[in-house]
Image (spheres, helix red, strand yellow):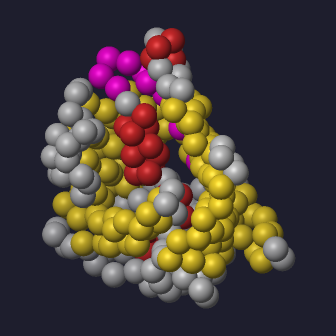
Amino acid sequence: MRRLFTITFLLLFIPFAEVFSQNAFEGGEWFKFRIHYGLFNASYATLEVDEAHLNDRPVYHVKGRGKSTGLLSLFFKVDDDYQTYIDRQTGKPYKFIRKINEGGYTKDLEIDFDHQANQAHVHNKKTDKRQTYSVPNNVHDMLSAFYYIRNQINGRDLKPGDEMKLKMFIDDENTDFKLVFLGREVIKTKFGKVATLKFRPYVLAGRVFKEKESLTIWVSDDKNKIPVKIEADLAVGSLDADLEAYKGLKHQFSIIMN
């Protein structure tokens, strides 16, 4: 269950260029998602962006929060806090914070990225242990990856089967993240019908997912590239996440009126 919430957060928070090209977001943006696990309204997750400075560098400070609700919180409490500080021009992360409590399983990590030296400096605050890891060029954390990808998606040029790849560093290891474009689809949301781009993130089969093709994500086919829906077939049960509320979008949200 705890891995389920981590992976869901990762997906909410998914040829790349060196600089932001489409400016899909700006400071003041805020999303709220409702996450369902089977019959449970399992949790809510929020993402917000503020303009800030880190060591005199202009950055976007992105904050992601997730909490369990309702009956699920009675036997599996979730309280997750994710933060990243990303360069406003390149989208590269400078600092990543992950502080989670998922059913008693806790992590409290702070990661500083040195892109010139290709290193990630990890401070485990639970154990007060510090370690340094080698990372590849243009590496991203769990949140910065999502915002970077949003700025690089060009819906006009996408064809079914096109792949998008990204290098990521999660906790203490490097990993590859890949999205495959499945096609275009108009879906129903609480806001009305929305034209979307449909992607499949490739994941490891086994403990959490039935197979590596168990996840599907829909993002709005407009300049915002908002994640509006996620579906996952799990080893036990299924999960859905839907956009519940939003504000501060840089561009008009394209909704097809009935």
- Residue 183 or residue 205, whichever sits in front: 205
Q: Is residue 28 above or below residue 235?
A: below
Please name the residue shown 32% across and 17% down the image: 39
Instruction: From the top left corner, tell me how far across and down residue 71 is, in percent.
Output: 46, 11
Instruction: From the top left corner, tell me how far across and down residue 188 is, in percent.
Output: 32, 39
Magenta-drawn stretch, dominant element (helix, strand or loop):
strand
Which image quadrant for residue 81? top right
Which image quadrant for residue 117? bottom right
Residue 228: within the magenta?
no
Q: Is residue 167 left or right of residue 201?
A: right
Q: Please give the range of residues in magenta.
A: 37-48
Please name the residue shown 20% across and 43% down the image: 206
- Residue 61 or residue 2, whichever sits in front: 2
Instruction: From the top left corner, tell me how far across and down residue 80 is, in percent.
Output: 58, 38
Which image quadrant for residue 66? top right
Q: Is the C terminus in the top left, top right, bottom left or bottom right quadrant? A: top left
Residue projecting furthest to the right: 56
Q: Is residue 77 above or below residue 184?
A: above
Q: Is residue 81 above or below residue 91?
A: above
Please name the residue shown 49% across and 37% down the image: 33
- Residue 24 or residue 98, whichever sits in front: 98
Please name the residue shown 24% across and 52% down the image: 204
Instruction: From the top left corner, tell me how far across and down residue 236 is, in percent.
Output: 22, 28
Q: Is residue 26 left or right of residue 57?
A: left
Q: Is residue 37 above or below residue 33?
A: above
- Is residue 46 visible to us here? no
Q: Is the N terminus in the top left, top right, bottom left or bottom right quadrant? A: top left
- Residue 26 or residue 239, whichever sits in front: 239
- Is residue 19 visible to us here? yes
**Total label count?**
0
Q: Is residue 58 left or right of residue 23?
A: right
